Image: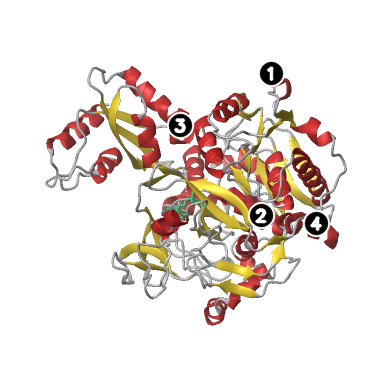
Amino acid sequence: MSQEDANLEARLEEQEAFDPPESFVEQANVTDPGIYEEFEENWPDCWERAADLISWDEEYDTVLEDGDAPFYEWFTGGELNASYNCLDRHVEDGRADEAAIEWVGELGETRSYTYDELLAEVNEFAATLRGLGVEEDDVVTLYMPMIPELPIAMLACARIGAPHSVVFAGFSADALATRMNSADSEYLVTCDGYYRRGDALDHISKTNEGLEGVEHEVSDVVVVDRLGDDLEHSLADNQHDYDELVADYEGETVEPVSRDAEDMLFLMYTSGTTGQPKGVKHTTGGYLAYTAWTSRAVLDIEADDTYWCAADIGWITGHSYIVYGPLALGTTSVMYEGTPDYPEKDRLWQIVEDYGVDIFYTAPTAIRAFMKWGKEYPEKHDLSSLRLLGTVGEPINPRAWKWYYKHIGNEECPIVDTWWQTETGGMMITTLPGINTMKPGSAGPPLPGIDARVVSASGEEVDAGQAGYVTVDKPWPGMLRTLYNNDERFINEYWREYSDEETDEWVYFPEDGAKIDDDSYITILGRVDDVINVSGHRLGTMEIESAVVGVDGIAEAAVVGGDHEVKGEAVYVYAIPEDGYDADAELEERAVEGVLDSIGPIAKPEDVVFTPELPKTRSGKIMRRLLEDIASGNELGNTSTLRNPGVVDDIAAQVEES
Ligand code: PRX
C-alpha cells in the first residue's frame, strides 16, 4: 500500500460520521430537514405526498382507515392499476422511447426495453394469461430467475388484477409446492433453465418435481425457453411454450383493470419462527405509493436516472426496488441475470461503466465479497457516473461501509443503509441522503412518518446507548395487510408482543434487536427470533431443522446461525444420529442433501456436527445460544442451567478438531 493510501485508510478508519457530499445535496430530491416535523404534525395526511406520486383512476376518500386495527386500510375508496402506473402513464407522458429495463444476461447478451416495448410485452402476456382463463384475484405463481419475462409477468398479472406469488428460482421443488398449495395457485409461469457461471442449469425438472407435490389441479404452466438448444425437454399437456403462446396474442392490448387500493397486488412468502413460510399480503395503493415515495426520497431516483438494484426479484427487495418503485417513477432499471464474479470479479463494475449507472443498491454480503476480492476490480472501471449507493438486508459492519464509500463511491456518494423487511413493503429506517449525516454501521433515524422506536422487553423506550427491540408504533402505507388466509397468525406474529388490545393501541413488532444512539440513530443488531440471515437472505431455522430431521438416520437436530466473514451468518447443524446409524460422512452428506431438497442451495449448511446429545435446559429446551457461540467461535456462556452441561464441551472440542 502506498503511503498516500495508508494515510487515507487511517483517516477513514477514525472517521465516525460523514456528511452528505455537497454535490449530491445540491441536486437531491429531498433536502428540507423540516420534512420530519411536517410529517409528524400532519400524520397520517402526510402520506398524501406518497399517494400524489401515483395516478389514481378514482381518488381515495380516506388516507387511513383504522377502525379495524391492526387490519389497517390505506387510501380507501381509491382505485388504480399498478401496471398502468409503471408503464402506460410514462408512455402517455412522452417517455415511450426511454429505457425502462436494461437487461444483462450472464453470457453477455443484452436486451433493452423502452417503456413502449415493455408495455407491448406486458399487454401481450396479460392477454395470454386472460386467454388461459386467469381471472381477477386468481393467484399466479412465478418461478423464474432474473430474466425479463419475470417483471413482464408480474406487470401482466397486475394489469389484469391477478395477484402474483413469486417463488425465488433458487428455492427447491418442495418450496415451490408448499407455496402453490398455500396460495391455492392454479397457474404457474416458469422457464426451462438459466445460466450460472456459464453452465446451463435445469429448472424445468425441478419445476416438474415441485408440481408433483401440488395438491390441487394446476390448470396451466407457461414455460419460458431461456436455454434454447442447451436443454432438451418436453412439455406436458398443460404446459405451453411462452413464445408460441404469446405469438397468438401479438399486438393485443388489455385495458388495465381498476383495482381497489386495498386489493391484493401480490403475495410473498417469507420465513418465520415456525416451519411454515408466511404468505405476506401486499395491496395495491399503499404499497405502490410507499415504494414510489421511498424510491424518490431515499434512493433519490429520478426518471432520467439509470438505476441498479443488484438483488433478485425473487425477494422483496427486487419487487419493491427493481420493479414497482423505480418503474412507478419512470426510471431505467438495470437487471443482471448472473453472479458478480462471472466471468471475472469486475463484472458489476463493468456494467456500471457500460450503462453509466447513477444509483447502485446491494447487500452488505456482496460488499464484503468485493472487499475480499480487492479494490483492483473496481479500479479497472470508470465509476464516476455513480451518485448514490445503498445497502439492504443485514447489518453492515463499518469496515465494509467505508470500503464501499471509498472504493465504489470515491467519497462522493452518500450511502443509505436501509432497514426494512418483506412485511414492511419498503424502507423504514435509513438516513435521507440529502439531509442526514451518515454513521457507518448505524441505519439512521426512522423515515419521516415512521414511528419506529427501540424498547425494552416491557415496552419502555430504552435510554441512549442501550439495546432493546425495534417496534413501530404507527401504521404506514406499505405495511403488510395480513398473512394470506391466516389473520390469527398475523396478529400473533407481529402484534401480540407490544400492543394493548384493551385500549386498541397496536404496536408492530418486527422481531429485530437494536441499539439507540444518543442522536436517536438506530443501529440494528439482528433478528431476535429463530430466523437467521444468510447473505441477506432470511431463513427459518425451524424449516432447516425439519428438513434435517426428515433424513433417514437422524433423530434430532438443532440449527443455528454462526458468524461468517462474508455471508454475515451461516447455517450450522447439530444433529443426533438415530440408533444403528453411524455419524459418518455419508450421513452428513444426506443431511446436507435434505436441506438442499427441502429449501435450496442458499440454506446449505456450513457444517454438520454429530453429537450424542444436544445441550438442553432442565425443562428440555435446546439451548441455542450456546450452539450459536460454538458456531461463531465465541467464548461459551453460562452452562450451569443445563441438564447436561458436559455435552457443550464435547461439541466444542469436536468442532475445533474438524
Ligand atoms: O433482520 C433484519 C434484516 O433483514 C430482515 C428482513 O429480511 P427480509 O424480510 O428478507 O427482507 C430483507 C430485505 C428488506 C430484518 O428483520 N435487515 C434488513 N435490512 C437491514 C437488516 N438488518 C440490518 N440492517 C439493515 N439495513
Residue at 60% over, 63% down: 294
Label 3 vs label 1, nearer the camera: 3
Where, by quadrant of the figure, is residue 441 drawn? bottom left
Q: CA distance from mark 4 to mark 3?
A: 40 Å
Question: Percent from the top left, x then y, of residue 330?
Answer: 74, 58
Question: Percent from the top left, x then y, of residue 511?
Answer: 39, 56
Disc 1 element: loop
Question: Percent from the top left, x then y, of residue 213?
Answer: 53, 30
Q: Is mark 1 within 8 Å of ligand 1?
A: no
Can residue 90 be seen by looking at this rendering? yes
Q: Is residue 574 left or right of residue 234?
A: left
Q: CA distance from mark 2 to mark 3?
A: 30 Å
The residue carrying mark 2 is: 324
Disc 3 element: helix
- Who comes first in sequence, dot 3 or dot 1? 1
The residue carrying mark 4 is: 88
Q: Nearer the viewer, residue 366 or 552?
A: 552
Q: Nearer the viewer, residue 217 or 568?
A: 217
Can residue 31 be seen by looking at this rendering? no
The residue carrying mark 1 is: 232
Label 2 vs label 3, nearer the camera: 3
Considering only vertical position in the picture, is 95 above or below 363?
Answer: below
Considering only vertical position in the picture, is 519 above or below 592?
Answer: below
Q: Disc 2 marks which amino acid?
A: Tyr
Disc 2 element: helix
Residue lying furthest front: 216
Label 4 vs label 3, nearer the camera: 3
The residue carrying mark 3 is: 598
Q: CA distance from mark 1 to mark 4?
A: 37 Å
